Amino acid sequence: MKKIFFLLLLSSAAYAQQAVPDSTDSIVFRSYEDSLKAELSRAGNREFMEDFTTRFAKYYDNAAQYERFASMTVDALEMELFEQRAAQKKLLENAPVTPFLKNHLTREADFQYWHLLYAYPVIRANNDQKSRRLVSVPEEITRGFRKQEMAYPFNLKYRAFRHLVPYYVSYENSRERNFEKYTNMLLMVNDKAEYSLKHLKGEIADYSLAQLLFAYKAYLSSSLAQSVVSQVENDEIRARFTGTYLDDIARQQAVVAEKERERQAKENPVLTFVNLKGKTFDLSEFKGKVVYIDFWASWCGPCKAQFPYARKLHETLPEKLKKDIVFLYISIDDTVERWQEGIKSNGLEDFVNGHVEGGWGAEVLAKLGIRSIPRYMLVDKSGKIVDANARRPNDPEILPHLIRLAE
């Protein structure tokens, strides 16, 4: 008996990972499902359901249906689903079952038909990472769906309808965006929540919001989660998404923030140098300017060979950009005296100069992976290293690169 019941409902594993849990569903549907169990215990209904399930199990196997979408056109899918639905209704016409079960199966057949048609473009778009747009289905197909069905809360009694809701919201919300795909998950959840509140009512809106909270928990911020939860009308459903749920998101957000800080620290480590007055400085002093860094040493012949090209490069810059581009010379000389003498002998007094203490053993060189000189780097106006191995001053491509960053 229990096996037959679950064959009838056939909630696929693929969907189960995204759908609102049965414990939440039960708030609204448990009494109806109890009635359905009672109906299936009747002798005539039980035998009929065994035959019905054998014939149409494929139609209700969501995981298998979703997998087939990649190799099917929407026209072929629509034709096949239409025939499957028609076959179910024909079998039900003179079936020796109670009116309750006949109505239930008819409604499930209809909603499964629409669920799969609305799921088709959404799942295909999600699986196609290269595409920037969701490919719409022909208007004549979706036009056949009676959108007023989304206003009847008793439709939530049917599992196929509950499967339909998130895909309907995804597709219709996408239509309002001209089918442009999202690149920001928070914006996507926010827009779908707003669509649900605008176009759905009462329990169906609550169900849609709950589905969003459950499916996208891993991507939510605390503020967005609290906003969505606050708009759930049903007290019992709303309570399921407070407390532990919101605490989990706060912890999750803290972990993500820490990983982002670590990533940024790795990609853009704080680089400290010593100026000619013996004071420490870092790249934050040049925020709002482009910085062209030259790592050199007084003993480095190839470094000194580039200095005339660097001066010429600076002179070639448009006057209005000279103040927006900093030429920063960082010496790795072993001693301050050799560094200062190198500045004078190479005519670098008019540029910004810095020194790293410790020579090749300096921590900043290890952070940047510098094992040879000369070495050049480009830092944009935000202070981010945009080229850790930039072109040399004698390369004709460096000037247009500097200008692009500065404009």
Image (cartoon, rainbow, N blue to C red):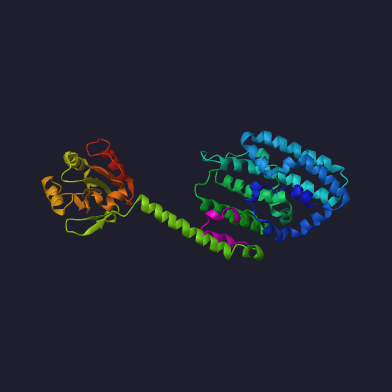
Image quarter of the C terminus: top left
Residue in view at x 57 percent, y 64 percent? 244
Which quadrant of the structure image shows residue 228?
A: bottom right
Q: Please determine whether, in this image, residue 233 is positioned above or below residue 273.
A: below
Q: Is residue 120 left or right of residue 300?
A: right
- The residue range painted magenta reads 214-232
Q: Main secondary structure of the magenta part?
A: helix
Give coordinates of residue 204: x percent, y percent. 67, 56
Give coordinates of residue 59: x percent, y percent. 73, 41
Say if the magenta span includes residue 224.
yes
343 or 177, which lies in front? 343
Say if the magenta span includes residue 324.
no
Outermost residue, front direction? Answer: 361
Give coordinates of residue 237: x percent, y percent. 65, 62
Residue in view at x 40 percent, y 52 percent? 263
Residue in view at x 31 percent, y 50 percent? 367
Q: Is residue 92 left or right of residue 179?
A: right
Query: Could you tell me if residue 388 is visible in this image?
Result: yes
